Image: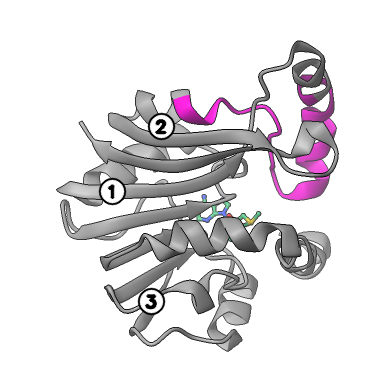
Amino acid sequence: MGFYGDVILPRLCDFAMRNKQLQPYRERVIGAAEGRVLEIGIGSGRNLPFYRSPVTELLALERSPQLTAMARNAPQPGAPVNFIEASAEAIPLDDRSIDTVVTTWTLCSIPDAAMALTEMRRVLQPGGKLLFVEHGMAPDRNVRRWQDWLTPAWKCISGGCHLNRPISAMIEGAGFRIERVETGYMPGPKAMTFMYEGSARPN
Ligand SMILES: C[S@@+](CC[C@H](N)C(=O)[O-])C[C@H]1O[C@@H](n2cnc3c(N)ncnc32)[C@H](O)[C@@H]1O
C-alpha cells in the first residue's frame, strides 16, 4: 500500500478510535455479545477490553497486518482470541458457525460493504445476531449534502471511509431484520458523527 497506507493510516485509525466519546457505544455493543463471536475489522483492538464472559471465543478479523499487530498487543479479554488476517468480503469461516457478529465503525470503509454483510449473514447461525455501531448517512438534507460533497476527498485520506452510507438499509438489504436501532449525532462535525447503533437477526 505504500508508506501512507502501511505506516500513517494504521496510526491515524488507532488515534481516531481512541476517542473517549466512542467508549459508551463500545460498552453497550460489545456487552451484548455472546458465544462464538466474530468481530469484523478489529482495527487496533479498542473493543477487546469490553468482551465479557458470555463470550466463549473471539475471532478477530482484520485485513491490515499493521492493525492486527496492534490488536495482538492490546489488553486481551478473558476468552480466547484468534486473529484472522482476511477481508470481510471473503470471510474464511463455515456457514452458520458464529453466534454473534460485531461491527463497529467498519461498514464505512469496507470497499464492498454489501458483500461483507452477505458474508456476515452466511456465517451467522439462524438464531444469531449482528451487533453494530456505525456512522453514516444523516437524516438532514443539509448535512447529507456535505456528506456527499466531502466523501470523494475524505475517502482518499481516510482509508476509504464513506460519510454517506445508509447503514440500516444496507443491513436490511443483506437479508437481516433490524431488531433495534438507535440513531443520533455524537458531538462533533455533523457530517461525520451521525451514528446507528443496534442489533439485527438473519431473516
Ligand atoms: C475506523 S476503523 C475501526 C476499527 C475498530 N472496528 C474499532 O472500532 O476501533 C475501520 C476498520 O475496518 C477495517 N477494514 C476496512 N475494510 C476492511 C475489509 N475489507 N475487511 C476487513 N477489515 C476492513 C480497517 O482496516 C480498520 O481496521
- Foreground of the two, 130 or 70: 130
Instruction: Find residue 52 and name its label.
Output: 3
Relative image position of residue 8 (x, y in whole percent): 82, 66
- Which of discs 2 and 1 lies nearer the camera? The answer is 1
The residue depicted at 84 percent of the width and 28 percent of the height is 150
Determine whether the beta carbon of the residue marked 1 sits less than 8 angstroms from the nearest atom of ligand 1.
no
Relative image position of residue 40 (x, y in whole percent): 45, 57
Q: Which numbered disc, 1 or 3, marks the residue that appears first in the sequence?
A: 3
Determine if the magenta segment contains residue 166: yes
What residue is pinned by disc 1?
A: 129
Q: Residues within 10 Å of mark 3 (few under 14, many from 20)?
A: some
Relative image position of residue 16 (x, y in whole percent): 77, 60
Which image quarter holds the C terminus? top left
- Label 1's element? strand
- Label 3's element? loop
Q: Which numbered disc, 3 or 2, marks the residue that appears first in the sequence?
A: 3
Q: Which numbered disc, 2 or 1, marks the residue that appears first in the sequence?
A: 1
Q: Residues within 10 Å of mark 1 (few under 14, many from 20)?
A: many
Question: Image quarter for residue 194?
Answer: top right
Q: What residue type is labelled 3?
A: Arg
Magenta segment boundaries in residue numbering: 147-168
Q: Residues within 10 Å of mark 2 (few under 14, many from 20)?
A: many
What residue is pinned by disc 2?
A: 171
Main SS of residues in magenta: helix
Quick check: marks 1 and 3 in contact, CB under 8 Å?
Answer: no
Q: In this view, does 92 lie to the left or right of 109?
A: left
Instruction: Find residue 19 and name its label.
Output: none
Q: Which amino acid does label 1 sit on?
A: Lys
